[in-house]
Image (spheres, rainbow, N blue to C red):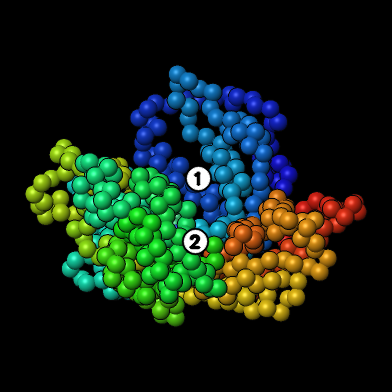
Amino acid sequence: MSLNEIAGPVNYNSSYVPLQTTESISCEEAFSTKAFRNISEVVVSSLEQYLQNIEPVSGLALTDPAILTQKARSLMTNASEEIAAFDENRLRKIIDLYTKTGIQVHSKGYMGRQFSGVLPLSGVFDLVNATVNQPSSFYEAAQLPNVAERIMQEELNKYIGYPEDTFTMVTTSGGSLANLTALLAARNYKYPNVWNSGLHGIQPEGRPAVAISENAHYSIKRAIGIMGVGEDQIVKLPVNDKNQIDSRRVPLMLKKAKEQGLHVFCMVASACTTDTGSFDPLEELSTIARENNIWFHVDGAHGASLLLSDSHRYKLKGLENADSFIWDAHKMLFTPGTCTLLFYKDKQRSYGAFRQDASYVFEKEADIYTALDSGEQNFECTKRPLIMNLWVSWAMHGKAVFSQKIDRLCYLAAEAYNILCNENDFELVHQPQANILCFRYVPDNLDPEVHPHFQLNTRNKIKEEGRFFISKVELNGQEVLRVVFMNHEIEMKHFRMLLQEIRRTGQDIIAAQNGRSAQHKLHTAINIL
Ligand SMILES: *Cc1c(COP(=O)(O)O)cnc(C)c1O
């Protein structure tokens, strides 16, 4: 996409020219209710226009960072001692630049990642969060958010099935932090002295180790590194042909680990995996973990939302046995990033992740107010009231807005799979269990020796051309294309268009390599619908 397309109707100078700020205002005016009103109106109308004018099929207009920096700089005030007045035109240009340079999450060409366009109620509510600005780790600073957390944990537990009085939920900024928090709670529970004495004192039991799937998300390995357990102490659990942990082989793996001097204190399952959306057999694994006195953690960042769907809930059977699990609301509950729910079966254990005395904030004897504080259970001190975006949607629309969309997204992946079954030049690598589908483009004239990174190159070229945005992953040492359906408005005609785009792009790559002068047509963003 060209610079002018990104810039839209706005005419930017090619070099950085500081703005001539004419008007100045007082500090009081900058913080005034009138300013709030004026600015909000500009923001709402700009965003409405953006949403109205989404290109039906578009992915990403990747911009040279140097050019983008120049554009951004050209929109900055040059006032230093005076406060520049609110300039509506400039704010519109900033919003324009922001929306045009991002991944087009509202378009049907976006099929690449796990975040998406959000429910309007959930997104717009961020304005309330930011305006009242109540950091939520302590009840006294954020009363409604803390009550909303308790309400949401009860609402969601209708689908989880933990014993009512003993479980708890904590919110964190993202799944990676939630995984780390849960694993810290597991480590500190299994090794009660570790907070004070570090990892030194625990050698006699064996080196602390964590058992995880070959396909676990990288944040799990990262947590293991941060905790001082070390990646060398990861026991990799083998997977079956459905990319699920092969639970029949787990007991032997644990036995071998023990023989090697490892003490597995925690086992992590995925529900579902990031690459193929596969659900590990939670029920079998939870039984094995219990028999071996191992903390069982489930990474449900993407897939825990399927609990809300009557037709997909069975995939999470056994989740109710997990000592802890995580659930990203900013993925399949369509809230803005980030909002992660971290559940513990036993509330007491949630206090173990960060054992620390900080008497200036933590109360020894909880009263009715401080009983709702979560500062001891999460890493953050100042924390956004993450739950509010989710709770307000749940409160006003109810559960069905989530379950209907989830069903639709999973249906799209199943339909796309059916289409690919009949396309000879595509190879399927798994049957979708959620809304994620991986496959390969393998035309007859493809020589893998000549093109060892054909899938990757095809994916990158599609991204550069900007009409579709898909991702790629490596599965069993093999590159594959990956599609994540996050937009319920996608139809199979859009998926078929993607297949055509993959064919055209892939053939261009083969032709170019063959020495023929490939005709690289410049992409023009035509409305093909
Ligand atoms: C996305 C994802 C994560 C990471 O969560 P963030 O919210 O992006 O930090 C962890 N595990 C799985 C399985 C995921 O899909």
The disc placed on residue 42 is 1
| Identity of the residue drawn at 32% across and 56% down | 263
Q: Amino acid at mark 1?
A: Val
SS assignment at label 2:
loop
Q: Nearer the viewer, residue 448 or 109?
A: 448
Q: Nearer the viewer, residue 508 or 132?
A: 508
Residue of label 2? 214
Residue at position x 62%, y 59% from top?
A: 477
Q: Helix, strand or loop at disc 1? A: helix
Q: Looking at this view, name the residue that lies furthest to the right.
A: 516
Badge nearest the viewer, 1 or 2: 2
Looking at the image, residue 366 sits to the left or right of residue 518; the answer is left
230 to the left or right of 427: left
Front one among 478 and 204: 204
Q: Is residue 82 above or below residue 389?
A: above
Q: Position of residue 429 (x, y in %)?
A: 62, 70
Q: What whole-number distance in Å separates the C-alpha atoms at marks 1 and 2?
A: 49 Å
In the figure, 295 relative to 318: above or below? above
Q: Quadrant of residue 329?
A: bottom left
